[in-house]
């Protein structure tokens, strides 16, 4: 998955979860979220599949996880930070006419165009 796709995926996750912020009906939010928790949602498609031999030692498994997931994990964290800082900039600048949802939509369009 390239940077543009990761950015778009992160924005989609944030947009989806934005609708649940501050809601008091926890059961309804859980039902809307479905059975797929955020961690699983992130993992699907954003991290490479790991193939570990059945006879691998714990050290082999740890190395495979680190080597396979570390670069992708760094990219995902960087994209969440990037989107957060863009949201913070708009907030700090006092742009009260732009909602979080509006900015996330704008960022998604920019990501698709890059």
Image (spheres, rainbow, N blue to C red):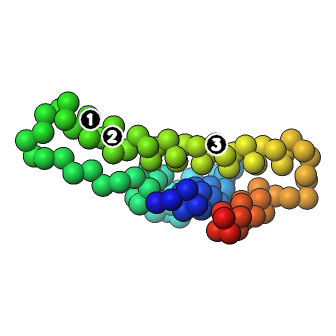
Q: Secondary structure at mark 2?
A: helix
Residue 43, given in percent of the width and then of the height, sits at 41, 53
Residue sitting nearer the eye, 78 or 38: 78
Instruction: Confirm or deny contact between disc 2 and disc 3 (CB under 8 A).
Output: no
Find out whether the residues at labels 1 and 3 contact each other: C-beta distance under 8 Å.
Answer: no
Going from N to C along the chain, the mark reached first, 1 or 3, is 1
The C terminus sits in image quarter: bottom right
Q: Position of residue 25 (x, y in %)?
A: 61, 55
Q: Quadrant of residue 64?
A: top left
Q: Which residue is mark 1?
A: 63
- Residue 101 visible in the picture: no
The secondary element bearing badge 3 is classed as: helix
Between tags 2 and 3, which lies in front?
2
Lateral position of residue 41 relative to residue 13, left or right: left
* Disc 2 from disc 1: Cα separation: 6 Å
* Residue beneath disc 3: 81
């Amino acid at each position: 998955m390239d940077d543009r796709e990761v950015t778009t995926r992160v924005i989609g996750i944030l947009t989806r979860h934005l609708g649940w912020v501050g809601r008091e009906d926890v059961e309804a939010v859980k039902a809307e979220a479905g059975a797929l928790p955020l961690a699983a949602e992130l993992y699907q498609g954003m991290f490479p599949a790991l193939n570990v031999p059945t006879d691998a030692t714990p050290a082999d498994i740890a190395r495979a996880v680190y080597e396979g997931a570390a670069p992708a994990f760094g990219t995902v964290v960087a994209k969440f930070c990037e989107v957060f800082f863009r949201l913070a900039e708009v907030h700090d600048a006092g742009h009260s006419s732009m909602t979080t949802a509006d900015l996330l939509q704008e960022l998604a369009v920019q990501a698709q165009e890059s």
